[in-house]
Image: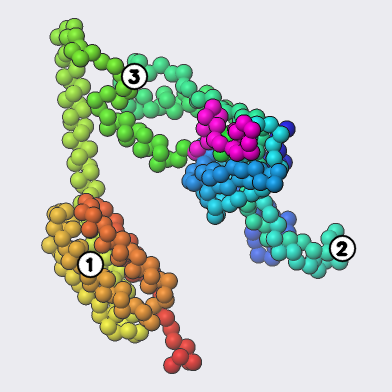
Amino acid sequence: MDYDSEQLESDRAGSQLEKNRFFDGKLMTAGDMRAEQQYHADRLELVTRGTTSSGILRGLGVQSVETVDGDLVVSVDAGVALDGAGRPVVVETPTTRRLPAPDGEACFLFLRFDETALESVPVPNANATSETESNRIVESFELTYRESPPDREPFRALDVDLSTVDDPSELAGRIVAAYHDDHRTADANREDTAVYLGGFERQPESDDWTRSETAPRPEHGLDHDLLFATLVDHIADTENPHDTEVDAEPPEPDLDPAELESIHERVDYLQSELADLKDRQQTASTHLLRKTLETTVRRFRETGERLADHDGSVSKAATEIADGVDAARHDDLHTAPAQYVTTVADLSPLLADLGDQLVGTTREATADRYLDTVAELQSTLAADQPAVEVAIALDAVAEAAADLEVVYQTAENV
Protein backbone atom coordinates (compact mmCIF):
# COMPACT_ATOMS: atom_id res chain seq x y z
CA MET A 1 0.00 0.00 0.00
CA ASP A 2 1.24 3.52 -0.79
CA TYR A 3 0.05 6.51 1.19
CA ASP A 4 0.28 9.48 -1.15
CA SER A 5 -1.57 12.63 -2.06
CA GLU A 6 -2.95 13.79 -5.36
CA GLN A 7 -0.35 15.56 -7.48
CA LEU A 8 -0.78 19.32 -7.90
CA GLU A 9 0.55 19.77 -11.42
CA SER A 10 -0.10 22.85 -13.54
CA ASP A 11 -1.96 22.09 -16.75
CA ARG A 12 -0.09 24.99 -18.31
CA ALA A 13 3.38 23.43 -18.00
CA GLY A 14 5.29 23.82 -21.25
CA SER A 15 2.67 26.06 -22.91
CA GLN A 16 3.18 29.59 -24.18
CA LEU A 17 3.13 32.10 -21.35
CA GLU A 18 0.16 34.45 -21.36
CA LYS A 19 -0.01 37.68 -19.35
CA ASN A 20 -2.41 40.55 -18.83
CA ARG A 21 -2.25 43.68 -20.96
CA PHE A 22 -3.18 46.69 -18.87
CA PHE A 23 -4.74 49.90 -20.20
CA ASP A 24 -6.73 52.80 -18.80
CA GLY A 25 -10.36 51.90 -18.24
CA LYS A 26 -9.83 48.15 -18.25
CA LEU A 27 -12.33 46.28 -16.05
CA MET A 28 -10.33 43.93 -13.84
CA THR A 29 -12.07 40.70 -12.92
CA ALA A 30 -11.08 37.82 -10.65
CA GLY A 31 -10.06 35.92 -13.79
CA ASP A 32 -7.65 38.70 -14.74
CA MET A 33 -6.08 38.63 -11.29
CA ARG A 34 -5.70 34.85 -11.43
CA ALA A 35 -4.12 35.11 -14.86
CA GLU A 36 -1.61 37.64 -13.51
CA GLN A 37 -0.62 35.30 -10.65
CA GLN A 38 -0.48 32.29 -12.98
CA TYR A 39 1.80 34.08 -15.44
CA HIS A 40 4.44 34.87 -12.83
CA ALA A 41 4.21 31.41 -11.25
CA ASP A 42 4.50 29.60 -14.62
CA ARG A 43 7.38 31.82 -15.72
CA LEU A 44 9.40 31.21 -12.56
CA GLU A 45 8.72 27.47 -12.52
CA LEU A 46 9.62 27.11 -16.21
CA VAL A 47 13.04 28.73 -15.65
CA THR A 48 13.65 26.81 -12.43
CA ARG A 49 12.87 23.43 -14.04
CA GLY A 50 15.28 24.13 -16.88
CA THR A 51 18.21 25.50 -14.88
CA THR A 52 18.11 23.98 -11.38
CA SER A 53 17.80 20.39 -10.25
CA SER A 54 15.01 19.40 -7.86
CA GLY A 55 15.69 18.26 -4.31
CA ILE A 56 16.59 19.55 -0.86
CA LEU A 57 18.34 22.93 -0.87
CA ARG A 58 18.59 23.47 2.89
CA GLY A 59 17.66 21.56 6.05
CA LEU A 60 14.74 19.04 5.95
CA GLY A 61 16.64 16.36 7.85
CA VAL A 62 14.38 13.60 9.20
CA GLN A 63 14.84 13.65 12.99
CA SER A 64 12.60 10.76 13.99
CA VAL A 65 10.13 8.18 12.67
CA GLU A 66 8.00 6.50 15.34
CA THR A 67 4.85 4.45 15.71
CA VAL A 68 2.52 6.11 18.22
CA ASP A 69 -0.97 4.75 18.96
CA GLY A 70 -1.00 2.87 15.69
CA ASP A 71 0.03 5.90 13.57
CA LEU A 72 3.33 6.85 11.96
CA VAL A 73 4.69 10.06 13.55
CA VAL A 74 7.42 11.80 11.54
CA SER A 75 9.50 14.83 12.60
CA VAL A 76 11.53 16.85 10.08
CA ASP A 77 13.74 19.95 10.38
CA ALA A 78 12.85 23.27 8.83
CA GLY A 79 14.21 23.79 5.33
CA VAL A 80 13.62 24.50 1.65
CA ALA A 81 13.37 22.24 -1.40
CA LEU A 82 12.52 22.53 -5.09
CA ASP A 83 10.04 19.99 -6.40
CA GLY A 84 9.98 18.43 -9.86
CA ALA A 85 7.72 21.21 -11.21
CA GLY A 86 10.17 23.94 -10.16
CA ARG A 87 8.10 25.10 -7.18
CA PRO A 88 9.70 26.03 -3.84
CA VAL A 89 8.51 23.88 -0.92
CA VAL A 90 9.13 25.63 2.40
CA VAL A 91 8.99 24.06 5.86
CA GLU A 92 9.22 27.15 8.05
CA THR A 93 9.77 25.48 11.44
CA PRO A 94 10.64 21.97 12.70
CA THR A 95 7.47 19.99 12.06
CA THR A 96 5.89 16.77 13.30
CA ARG A 97 3.11 15.09 11.30
CA ARG A 98 0.96 12.03 12.02
CA LEU A 99 0.25 9.63 9.11
CA PRO A 100 -1.56 6.30 8.80
CA ALA A 101 0.86 3.51 9.72
CA PRO A 102 2.28 1.50 6.79
CA ASP A 103 1.39 -2.17 6.36
CA GLY A 104 4.91 -3.24 5.42
CA GLU A 105 8.28 -3.07 7.13
CA ALA A 106 9.67 -0.17 5.08
CA CYS A 107 8.56 3.35 4.21
CA PHE A 108 10.06 6.06 2.03
CA LEU A 109 9.32 9.66 3.01
CA PHE A 110 8.46 12.42 0.54
CA LEU A 111 7.68 16.14 0.72
CA ARG A 112 5.04 17.45 -1.66
CA PHE A 113 3.98 20.99 -2.58
CA ASP A 114 0.50 21.84 -1.32
CA GLU A 115 -1.83 24.82 -0.99
CA THR A 116 -4.11 25.66 1.93
CA ALA A 117 -7.07 28.03 1.77
CA LEU A 118 -7.32 30.71 4.48
CA GLU A 119 -9.67 33.51 5.61
CA SER A 120 -13.20 32.57 4.64
CA VAL A 121 -15.03 35.77 3.63
CA PRO A 122 -18.61 36.40 2.40
CA VAL A 123 -19.25 36.75 -1.33
CA PRO A 124 -21.35 39.87 -2.06
CA ASN A 125 -22.56 38.63 -5.45
CA ALA A 126 -25.98 37.06 -4.99
CA ASN A 127 -25.50 34.96 -8.14
CA ALA A 128 -22.34 33.32 -6.82
CA THR A 129 -22.26 29.55 -6.43
CA SER A 130 -21.09 29.88 -2.83
CA GLU A 131 -21.89 32.34 -0.06
CA THR A 132 -18.26 32.40 1.13
CA GLU A 133 -14.83 32.11 -0.51
CA SER A 134 -11.27 31.85 0.76
CA ASN A 135 -9.55 35.21 0.80
CA ARG A 136 -5.98 33.83 0.90
CA ILE A 137 -4.10 30.74 -0.21
CA VAL A 138 -0.87 29.84 1.55
CA GLU A 139 1.69 27.69 -0.25
CA SER A 140 2.39 24.88 2.18
CA PHE A 141 3.57 21.27 2.11
CA GLU A 142 2.37 17.74 2.63
CA LEU A 143 4.51 15.06 4.26
CA THR A 144 3.80 11.66 2.73
CA TYR A 145 5.30 8.20 2.45
CA ARG A 146 5.27 5.26 0.09
CA GLU A 147 6.15 1.66 0.70
CA SER A 148 8.29 1.33 -2.42
CA PRO A 149 11.55 3.19 -3.15
CA PRO A 150 11.55 6.18 -5.53
CA ASP A 151 12.43 5.88 -9.19
CA ARG A 152 15.72 7.77 -9.44
CA GLU A 153 16.71 9.43 -12.69
CA PRO A 154 19.88 7.92 -14.18
CA PHE A 155 23.09 9.93 -14.15
CA ARG A 156 23.14 12.31 -17.08
CA ALA A 157 26.24 11.11 -18.91
CA LEU A 158 27.48 12.83 -22.08
CA ASP A 159 28.51 11.08 -25.27
CA VAL A 160 31.00 13.57 -26.73
CA ASP A 161 34.54 13.17 -28.05
CA LEU A 162 36.87 15.79 -26.56
CA SER A 163 40.18 14.10 -27.35
CA THR A 164 40.91 16.33 -30.37
CA VAL A 165 39.93 19.66 -28.76
CA ASP A 166 42.62 22.05 -27.50
CA ASP A 167 40.84 25.41 -27.45
CA PRO A 168 38.96 26.00 -24.12
CA SER A 169 36.09 27.82 -25.85
CA GLU A 170 35.60 24.96 -28.30
CA LEU A 171 35.78 22.46 -25.43
CA ALA A 172 33.06 24.30 -23.48
CA GLY A 173 30.91 24.67 -26.58
CA ARG A 174 30.99 20.95 -27.38
CA ILE A 175 30.08 19.98 -23.80
CA VAL A 176 27.12 22.40 -23.70
CA ALA A 177 25.90 21.32 -27.14
CA ALA A 178 26.11 17.63 -26.23
CA TYR A 179 24.19 18.17 -23.00
CA HIS A 180 21.56 20.19 -24.83
CA ASP A 181 21.07 17.53 -27.51
CA ASP A 182 20.92 14.65 -25.02
CA HIS A 183 18.94 16.12 -22.13
CA ARG A 184 17.03 19.21 -23.27
CA THR A 185 14.93 17.78 -26.05
CA ALA A 186 11.74 17.92 -23.95
CA ASP A 187 10.26 19.88 -21.06
CA ALA A 188 12.00 19.18 -17.75
CA ASN A 189 8.67 18.33 -16.08
CA ARG A 190 8.48 15.12 -14.07
CA GLU A 191 5.31 13.11 -13.57
CA ASP A 192 6.23 12.71 -9.92
CA THR A 193 7.07 16.11 -8.40
CA ALA A 194 7.54 15.10 -4.74
CA VAL A 195 10.95 15.54 -3.06
CA TYR A 196 12.39 12.35 -1.55
CA LEU A 197 13.62 12.66 2.08
CA GLY A 198 14.87 9.14 2.81
CA GLY A 199 13.92 5.51 3.54
CA PHE A 200 13.26 3.84 6.91
CA GLU A 201 12.86 0.25 8.17
CA ARG A 202 10.77 -1.15 11.01
CA GLN A 203 12.88 -3.07 13.49
CA PRO A 204 12.01 -6.77 13.99
CA GLU A 205 9.53 -7.46 16.80
CA SER A 206 9.11 -3.76 17.63
CA ASP A 207 7.56 -0.55 16.36
CA ASP A 208 10.90 1.29 16.22
CA TRP A 209 11.99 2.75 12.87
CA THR A 210 15.59 3.37 11.78
CA ARG A 211 17.08 4.83 8.62
CA SER A 212 17.63 2.18 5.99
CA GLU A 213 21.23 1.54 4.96
CA THR A 214 20.14 0.17 1.57
CA ALA A 215 17.54 2.80 0.63
CA PRO A 216 18.48 5.53 -1.87
CA ARG A 217 20.00 8.62 -0.31
CA PRO A 218 17.80 11.73 0.10
CA GLU A 219 17.38 13.85 -3.03
CA HIS A 220 19.47 17.04 -2.83
CA GLY A 221 19.33 19.93 -5.29
CA LEU A 222 22.49 21.06 -7.07
CA ASP A 223 22.78 24.82 -6.74
CA HIS A 224 25.38 27.00 -8.46
CA ASP A 225 27.54 27.42 -5.35
CA LEU A 226 27.88 23.66 -4.95
CA LEU A 227 28.81 23.08 -8.58
CA PHE A 228 31.25 26.00 -8.62
CA ALA A 229 32.93 24.84 -5.38
CA THR A 230 33.32 21.35 -6.82
CA LEU A 231 34.81 22.74 -10.02
CA VAL A 232 37.25 24.98 -8.15
CA ASP A 233 38.31 22.12 -5.88
CA HIS A 234 38.96 19.93 -8.91
CA ILE A 235 40.96 22.61 -10.74
CA ALA A 236 42.96 23.49 -7.63
CA ASP A 237 43.98 19.85 -7.01
CA THR A 238 46.80 19.86 -9.53
CA GLU A 239 48.65 16.87 -8.06
CA ASN A 240 46.12 14.09 -8.66
CA PRO A 241 42.54 15.37 -9.14
CA HIS A 242 41.13 11.98 -10.15
CA ASP A 243 42.94 9.97 -7.43
CA THR A 244 44.67 7.97 -10.12
CA GLU A 245 47.00 5.26 -8.86
CA VAL A 246 50.56 6.03 -9.90
CA ASP A 247 53.81 4.14 -9.51
CA ALA A 248 56.30 5.34 -6.92
CA GLU A 249 58.87 5.74 -9.69
CA PRO A 250 57.04 6.35 -12.96
CA PRO A 251 58.89 5.32 -16.09
CA GLU A 252 60.67 7.95 -18.07
CA PRO A 253 58.43 9.18 -20.90
CA ASP A 254 59.58 8.28 -24.37
CA LEU A 255 59.08 11.60 -26.11
CA ASP A 256 60.69 12.86 -29.25
CA PRO A 257 62.09 16.42 -29.41
CA ALA A 258 59.06 17.68 -31.35
CA GLU A 259 56.67 16.54 -28.62
CA LEU A 260 58.83 18.13 -25.92
CA GLU A 261 58.87 21.41 -27.85
CA SER A 262 55.09 21.32 -28.06
CA ILE A 263 54.82 20.80 -24.30
CA HIS A 264 57.16 23.73 -23.64
CA GLU A 265 55.07 25.96 -25.89
CA ARG A 266 51.87 25.05 -24.02
CA VAL A 267 53.53 25.66 -20.64
CA ASP A 268 54.73 29.08 -21.83
CA TYR A 269 51.19 29.85 -23.03
CA LEU A 270 49.66 28.84 -19.70
CA GLN A 271 52.19 30.93 -17.78
CA SER A 272 51.35 33.91 -19.96
CA GLU A 273 47.61 33.37 -19.37
CA LEU A 274 48.20 33.12 -15.62
CA ALA A 275 50.15 36.38 -15.55
CA ASP A 276 47.40 38.08 -17.55
CA LEU A 277 44.78 36.74 -15.14
CA LYS A 278 46.70 38.09 -12.15
CA ASP A 279 46.93 41.50 -13.82
CA ARG A 280 43.16 41.55 -14.45
CA GLN A 281 42.51 40.50 -10.84
CA GLN A 282 44.72 43.32 -9.54
CA THR A 283 42.95 45.84 -11.79
CA ALA A 284 39.53 44.69 -10.60
CA SER A 285 40.62 44.86 -6.95
CA THR A 286 41.99 48.39 -7.35
CA HIS A 287 38.79 49.51 -9.07
CA LEU A 288 36.66 48.04 -6.27
CA LEU A 289 38.67 49.79 -3.53
CA ARG A 290 38.44 53.12 -5.35
CA LYS A 291 34.68 52.81 -5.97
CA THR A 292 33.91 51.95 -2.34
CA LEU A 293 35.80 55.04 -1.16
CA GLU A 294 33.90 57.26 -3.61
CA THR A 295 30.58 55.68 -2.65
CA THR A 296 31.27 56.05 1.08
CA VAL A 297 32.09 59.75 0.69
CA ARG A 298 28.97 60.44 -1.39
CA ARG A 299 26.51 58.51 0.77
CA PHE A 300 27.71 59.80 4.13
CA ARG A 301 27.78 63.37 2.82
CA GLU A 302 24.21 62.98 1.55
CA THR A 303 23.21 61.48 4.92
CA GLY A 304 24.73 64.45 6.77
CA GLU A 305 22.83 66.90 4.58
CA ARG A 306 19.57 64.97 4.97
CA LEU A 307 19.86 64.98 8.79
CA ALA A 308 21.03 68.59 9.12
CA ASP A 309 17.56 69.94 9.97
CA HIS A 310 16.77 67.12 12.41
CA ASP A 311 19.86 66.45 14.52
CA GLY A 312 22.95 68.63 14.17
CA SER A 313 25.27 66.28 16.04
CA VAL A 314 24.33 63.27 13.91
CA SER A 315 24.66 65.35 10.75
CA LYS A 316 28.09 66.55 11.87
CA ALA A 317 29.25 63.00 12.64
CA ALA A 318 28.17 61.76 9.19
CA THR A 319 29.88 64.71 7.48
CA GLU A 320 33.12 64.12 9.43
CA ILE A 321 33.14 60.50 8.25
CA ALA A 322 32.70 61.66 4.64
CA ASP A 323 35.49 64.25 5.00
CA GLY A 324 37.88 61.70 6.52
CA VAL A 325 37.32 59.15 3.76
CA ASP A 326 37.56 61.88 1.11
CA ALA A 327 40.98 62.93 2.41
CA ALA A 328 42.21 59.33 2.35
CA ARG A 329 40.77 58.84 -1.13
CA HIS A 330 42.88 61.64 -2.57
CA ASP A 331 46.02 59.91 -1.24
CA ASP A 332 45.53 57.08 -3.79
CA LEU A 333 44.60 54.75 -0.94
CA HIS A 334 42.98 52.30 -3.38
CA THR A 335 46.42 51.34 -4.73
CA ALA A 336 47.72 50.21 -1.31
CA PRO A 337 45.53 47.37 0.06
CA ALA A 338 47.31 47.15 3.44
CA GLN A 339 46.99 50.90 4.03
CA TYR A 340 43.36 50.72 2.89
CA VAL A 341 42.57 48.15 5.61
CA THR A 342 44.38 50.23 8.25
CA THR A 343 42.46 53.36 7.28
CA VAL A 344 39.11 51.57 7.43
CA ALA A 345 40.05 50.14 10.83
CA ASP A 346 40.77 53.69 12.08
CA LEU A 347 37.40 54.78 10.66
CA SER A 348 35.47 51.96 12.37
CA PRO A 349 35.03 53.69 15.78
CA LEU A 350 33.56 56.79 14.07
CA LEU A 351 31.07 54.59 12.22
CA ALA A 352 30.07 52.90 15.49
CA ASP A 353 29.73 56.27 17.31
CA LEU A 354 27.40 57.51 14.58
CA GLY A 355 25.21 54.44 15.08
CA ASP A 356 24.96 55.13 18.82
CA GLN A 357 23.63 58.63 18.08
CA LEU A 358 20.82 57.49 15.77
CA VAL A 359 18.32 56.69 18.55
CA GLY A 360 15.33 59.03 18.22
CA THR A 361 16.62 60.56 14.99
CA THR A 362 16.08 57.70 12.54
CA ARG A 363 13.64 54.84 12.42
CA GLU A 364 14.65 51.92 14.61
CA ALA A 365 14.67 49.32 11.82
CA THR A 366 17.03 51.37 9.61
CA ALA A 367 19.27 52.23 12.57
CA ASP A 368 19.50 48.53 13.52
CA ARG A 369 20.43 47.63 9.95
CA TYR A 370 23.18 50.27 9.99
CA LEU A 371 24.58 48.94 13.29
CA ASP A 372 24.48 45.37 11.94
CA THR A 373 26.59 46.36 8.92
CA VAL A 374 29.08 48.17 11.18
CA ALA A 375 29.35 45.04 13.33
CA GLU A 376 29.93 42.93 10.20
CA LEU A 377 32.68 45.34 9.08
CA GLN A 378 34.35 45.08 12.48
CA SER A 379 34.18 41.27 12.33
CA THR A 380 35.77 41.34 8.87
CA LEU A 381 38.60 43.52 10.17
CA ALA A 382 39.09 41.33 13.25
CA ALA A 383 39.31 38.23 11.06
CA ASP A 384 42.16 39.85 9.07
CA GLN A 385 40.28 39.44 5.79
CA PRO A 386 41.74 40.74 2.48
CA ALA A 387 41.19 44.35 1.46
CA VAL A 388 38.54 43.33 -1.07
CA GLU A 389 36.39 41.76 1.67
CA VAL A 390 36.86 44.87 3.83
CA ALA A 391 35.78 47.03 0.88
CA ILE A 392 32.61 44.99 0.40
CA ALA A 393 31.77 45.32 4.11
CA LEU A 394 32.42 49.10 4.03
CA ASP A 395 30.17 49.48 1.00
CA ALA A 396 27.37 47.73 2.92
CA VAL A 397 27.79 50.26 5.78
CA ALA A 398 27.56 53.17 3.32
CA GLU A 399 24.44 51.68 1.73
CA ALA A 400 22.83 51.28 5.16
CA ALA A 401 23.67 54.91 5.98
CA ALA A 402 21.98 56.06 2.78
CA ASP A 403 18.85 54.07 3.76
CA LEU A 404 18.49 55.71 7.20
CA GLU A 405 14.94 57.04 7.51
CA VAL A 406 14.41 60.23 9.50
CA VAL A 407 11.81 60.23 12.28
CA TYR A 408 9.54 63.22 11.77
CA GLN A 409 7.94 64.42 14.98
CA THR A 410 4.19 64.92 14.94
CA ALA A 411 2.36 67.83 16.56
CA GLU A 412 1.51 65.60 19.53
CA ASN A 413 5.19 64.88 20.19
CA VAL A 414 6.39 68.48 19.87
Q: Do the residues bearing badges 3 and 2 touch, measured as CB atoms within 8 Å?
A: no
Residue 197 in the figure: left or right of residue 387: right
Residue annotated with mark 1: 348
Secondary structure under tag 2 reads loop
Q: Position of residue 332 (x, y in %)?
A: 14, 59
Amino acid type at circle 3 is Val
Which mark is nearer the camera, 3 or 1? 1
Q: Position of residue 221 (x, y in %)?
A: 50, 38
Secondary structure under tag 1 reads helix
Amino acid type at circle 1 is Ser
Residue annotated with mark 3: 165
Query: Residue 209, relative to residue 288: is it above or below?
Result: above
The residue under the point 41% across, 75% down is: 364
Please tell me how crowded label 3 is: few (under 14), some (14-19), or many (20+) other residues with Cα within 10 Å: few
Find residue 127 and name its label.
Answer: 2
Query: Residue 286, relative to residue 326: is it above or below?
Result: above
Q: Which residues are magenta?
A: 201-221
User: Which image quarter: residue 12?
Assistant: top right
Nearest the camera: 247 or 200?
Answer: 200
The residue under the point 61% across, 43% down is: 66
The residue under the point 16% across, 68% down is: 327
Amino acid type at circle 2 is Asn
Q: Position of residue 283 (x, y in %)?
A: 21, 47
Which mark is nearer the camera, 2 or 1? 1
Reply yes or no: does residue 41 show up in magenta.
no
Nearest the camera: 30 or 342?
Answer: 342
**Label 2 vs label 1: CA separation?**
67 Å
Mark 2 or mark 1: name the one nearer the start of the chain: 2
